[in-house]
Image (tube, rainbow, N blue to C red):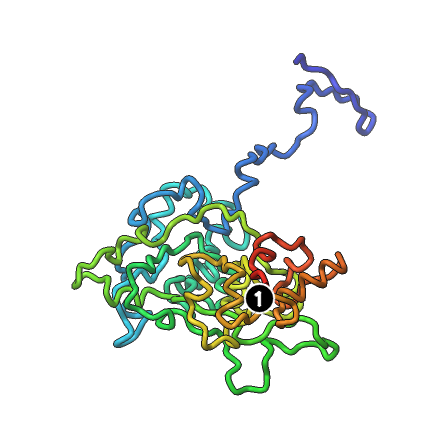
Amino acid sequence: MAPRAIKCVFNGTLLVFICCALTVFASPQRRRPATANTERIDYSRFSHATAEHRVACSSCHTFPSKNWKQVRKGDEAFADVTEYPEHQACLGCHRQRFFARERPVPRICSNCHVRATPTETSRYPFPSLGEAFLSTTKGREFVSDFRVLFPHDKHTDASCEDCHKTHQPQEKSDDEFVTKPPKNIGDGFWLKKGTFKTRPLTHAGCFTCHNQESELAPLPQNCDSCHKQPAVETRAADFDEQLARSMGIQDWWTLTGWRKRTSAGAFRHEVHPDLKCAQCHQTVMTNVVPVKSCGGAEGCHVTATLDDGGILNYEIDQRNKNAGFVCAKCHITFGNKPVPASHINAIPKAAK
């Protein structure tokens, strides 16, 4: 582009400037526009699912961590991965993010550090420490990138209760709700204690048998033998995030269990103490419970006729009379959907 002259008068003197049309006025250095990839990635939330992180576990995690004797004391200590990877494991791919001009600190630091400053370098407890991690602000929102594939069929000598406990049981208390319900709750739904079951939070129980001394595979350093990337979940859960928030539910155990309830979201384990787990969970490693199991030998909730008192019979009958009827005995968000064939077929034919 050819230069051009610019004339201006300053204190009666004619001044002539010859400059390039692109640089007539000084302007800040143009920044390179953010690429779609940069805008899409939130570096404050590490994910094992991204392509660049699908590497061998040992490339980042060292077994055991240097601090394993410090984070668990005395007899509770055992060799484990109990600390986040060192910076060197990340710098190979993310050096630019570590030195990004972000204030107060680069966002990538928040994956491990509570506050990353020259005087404050403390990290969050590592997720493998269980309650110590889940009780932190980071832990309350934690959603694992992995699904633990536990072979129940190879542990038939163990009892379900060894690993799965009733969470927040009511027991003999008069307070049956997890949080205080409104005064006008009436017959409306409000989450009750003893609704969910827990599962192991740490490696403590697993490493009792699977350790270096026993040489029983899989060994502790074989992380990917149990921790697998989950398949894309296509089943909806009988869970309402807004409802849980309105109840003031902040407990990690409750929210995690509730978000995976692909069957009856309101089912309460504690009021069924005499049932064996396998009576309902007929297929291991699944949250789907067949509705026919609710009938049981005594026809508890599914009976041959409505006169026999089955709640499933009653609610289907009400739906047939009124299309707007909501099945609220067992369900939360599923209650206003069409009655599935599995429910209708679960009702036994009445004897002639």
Q: At 48% from the left edge and 73% from the top edge, which residue is drawn?
A: 167
Q: At 52% from the left edge and 75% from the top edge, which residue is drawn?
A: 194
Q: Relative to residue 132, is residue 64 depicted above or below?
A: above
Q: Dot 1, how many residues are within 10 Å of its Cα: few (below 14), some (14-19), or many (20+)?
A: many
Depth order, front residue of 176/206: 176
Which residue corresponds to mark 1?
302
Query: Image quarter for residue 327?
Result: bottom right
Tell me the quarter of the image containing the N terminus: top right
Query: Image quarter for residue 212?
Result: bottom left
User: Can residue 206 be seen at all in this image of the molecule?
Assistant: yes
* Residue 324: % across, % down: 76, 58
Q: Relative to residue 3, is residue 287 depicted above or below?
A: below
* Residue 241: % across, % down: 62, 60
Depth order, front residue of 90/183: 183
**Count of numbered circles on the image:** 1
User: Can residue 106 be seen at all in this image of the molecule?
Assistant: no
Tell me the quarter of the image containing the C terminus: bottom right
Which type of secondary structure does the marked residue at label 1 adopt? loop
Q: At 45% from the left edge and 73% from the top edge, which residue is drawn?
A: 275
Q: Report the residue that reaches farthest toward the front.
A: 352
Depth order, front residue of 136/254: 254
Give the amino acid type for the residue marked by disc 1 in the picture: Val
Depth order, front residue of 32/176: 176
